[in-house]
Image (cartoon, rainbow, N blue to C red):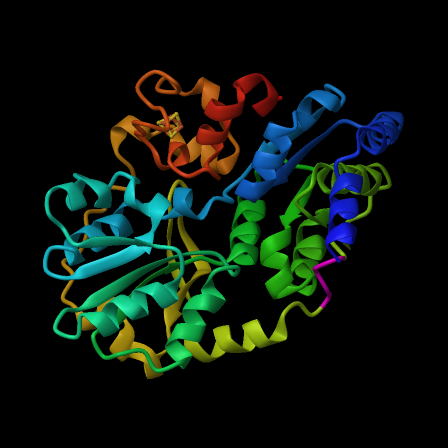
């Protein structure tokens, strides 16, 4: 098993195979602008310098694929407010994202009881160990992480536990972007999300927007193959959903996870940082679980309508794929992973953070 996994990894990183795929892409002689919506894809593309292998007339841009980056300022402010009197537990990257006046990390330094966790189950454990305190899990992420939150809800968490829900959904966000018109010829769809939702939710987008799409895995060969498959569709004037990541993604997806999600959550319309309110692209807890809904349980004052601090106005362009990190006046000067101004510089999946770590030349073309 271990040997097979090693062999597979070698295959998916093999130079010769990569160069053969690149030659096929070049032979198509087809200009295109392609978007992916996944922070892990951006890491793979940039870390392995895949853009530098492609012909100059193929542009691969990063869209809104980092969950930390798209969580709006007002939801960070909600978590900061709740940490005044309660324990707030969330994933490490969320701590450093600036809110309107302070980040959760800043609040922690000022004495706030904010706990970094790796899974929602840890937040439940904290609640069990602190029965006299309220514990709020600040839940972020796409269809990939939402099932873990759903599982917690279905397993009867303690009464002093609740969820500040910031989960988001990818297909309605793609619909929103394509309706807005973002000037792309094809989409690389995210492999992780697709393992949960399957391939079928993308079909409608192919038909509605005549948009070629390929679901890709997370090795360099996966991404190059997905680009080749997309380029063939674009050249042949086709618009289908194809699945490059067949070793994990099926047509139906993970139906158990889907069932857990539909039992606990309903679609809602909330803001995405840089994009505004996207219809039906967020999750909210169903009425049956409102005892665990922090927005119902606590009187959280209406947060400011400020969508982004002036200092990080350029993040919106990066999130939409309309601007490159190096074009931001703050990039590498006032804004670095150690001292981020905007959310895109915080997470290891943020486009600016990736460009800073691996270099803008391989990040942008
Ligand atoms: S460099 Fe910083 S301020 Fe500029 S877009 Fe990136 S995260 Fe935002």
Quadrant (top left/top right/bottom left/bottom right) for the C terminus: top right
What residue is rendered at 17% in x and 75% in y? 131
Residue 246 belongs to the span the image colors magenta: no
What residue is rendered at 69% in x and 28% in y? 50
User: Is residue 162 rendered to the left or right of residue 65?
Assistant: left
User: Is residue 293 rendered to the left or right of residue 52?
Assistant: left
Along the viewing direction, whichever of 37 and 96 lies nearer the viewer:
96
User: Is residue 39 rendered to the left or right of residue 19?
Assistant: left
Question: What is the x, y in percent for residue 130?
Answer: 18, 70
Question: What is the x, y in percent for residue 108?
Answer: 17, 46
Residue 87 versus residue 93 in the image, above or below = below
The residue stretch that appears in magenta: 247-251
What residue is rendered at 71% in x and 53% in y? 206
Is residue 244 shown to the viewer in this render? no
Residue 6 versus residue 148 in the image, above or below = above
Along the viewing direction, whichever of 42 and 105 lies nearer the viewer:
105
Is residue 259 shown to the viewer in this render? yes
What residue is rendered at 53% in x and 57% in y? 172
Along the viewing direction, whichever of 130 and 237 lies nearer the viewer:
130
Say which quarter of the image contains residue 155.
bottom left
Question: What is the x, y in percent for residue 363?
Answer: 57, 24
- The image quadrant in which ligand 1 is located: top left
Residue 248 belongs to the span the image colors magenta: yes
Question: What is the x, y in percent for residue 64?
Answer: 50, 43
User: Is residue 174 rendered to the left or right of residue 126?
Assistant: right
Quadrant (top left/top right/bottom left/bottom right) for the N terminus: bottom right
From the image, give the main secondary structure of the stretch colored magenta. loop
């Amino acid at each position: 098993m271990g040997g097979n996994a090693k062999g597979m990894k070698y295959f998916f990183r093999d130079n010769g195979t990569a160069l053969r795929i690149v030659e096929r892409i070049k032979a198509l002689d087809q200009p295109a602008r392609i978007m992916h919506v996944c922070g892990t894809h951006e890491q793979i593309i940039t870390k392995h310098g895949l853009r530098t292998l492609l012909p100059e007339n193929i542009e691969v841009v990063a869209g809104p694929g980092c969950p930390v980056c798209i969580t709006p300022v007002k939801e960070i402010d909600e978590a900061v407010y709740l940490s005044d009197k309660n324990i707030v537990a969330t994933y490490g990257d969320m701590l450093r994202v600036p809110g309107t006046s302070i980040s959760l990390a800043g609040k922690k330094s000022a004495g706030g009881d904010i706990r970094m966790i790796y899974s929602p189950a840890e937040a439940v454990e904290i609640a069990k160990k602190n029965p006299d305190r309220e514990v709020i899990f600040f839940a972020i992420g796409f269809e990939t992480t939402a099932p873990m939150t759903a599982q917690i809800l279905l397993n009867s968490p303690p009464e002093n536990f609740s969820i500040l829900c910031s989960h988001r959904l990818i297909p309605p966000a793609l619909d929103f972007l394509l309706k807005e018109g973002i000037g792309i010829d094809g989409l690389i769809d995210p492999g992780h999300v697709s393992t949960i939702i399957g391939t079928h939710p993308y079909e409608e987008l192919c038909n509605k927007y005549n948009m070629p799409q390929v679901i890709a895995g997370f090795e360099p060969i996966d991404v190059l193959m997905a680009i080749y498959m997309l380029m063939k569709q674009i050249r042949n004037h086709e618009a289908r959903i194809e699945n490059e990541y067949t070793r994990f993604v099926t047509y139906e997806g993970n139906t158990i996870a889907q069932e857990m999600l539909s039992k606990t959550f309903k679609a809602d319309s909330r803001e995405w940082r840089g994009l505004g309110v996207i219809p039906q692209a967020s999750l909210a807890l169903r009425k049956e679980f409102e005892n665990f809904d922090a927005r119902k349980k606590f009187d959280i004052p209406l947060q400011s309508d400020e969508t982004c601090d002036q200092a990080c106005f350029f993040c919106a362009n990066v999130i939409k794929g309309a601007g490159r990190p190096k074009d931001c006046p703050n990039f590498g000067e006032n804004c670095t992973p150690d001292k981020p101004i905007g959310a895109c510089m915080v997470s290891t999946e943020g486009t600016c953070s990736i460009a800073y770590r691996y270099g803008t030349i391989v990040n942008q073309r």
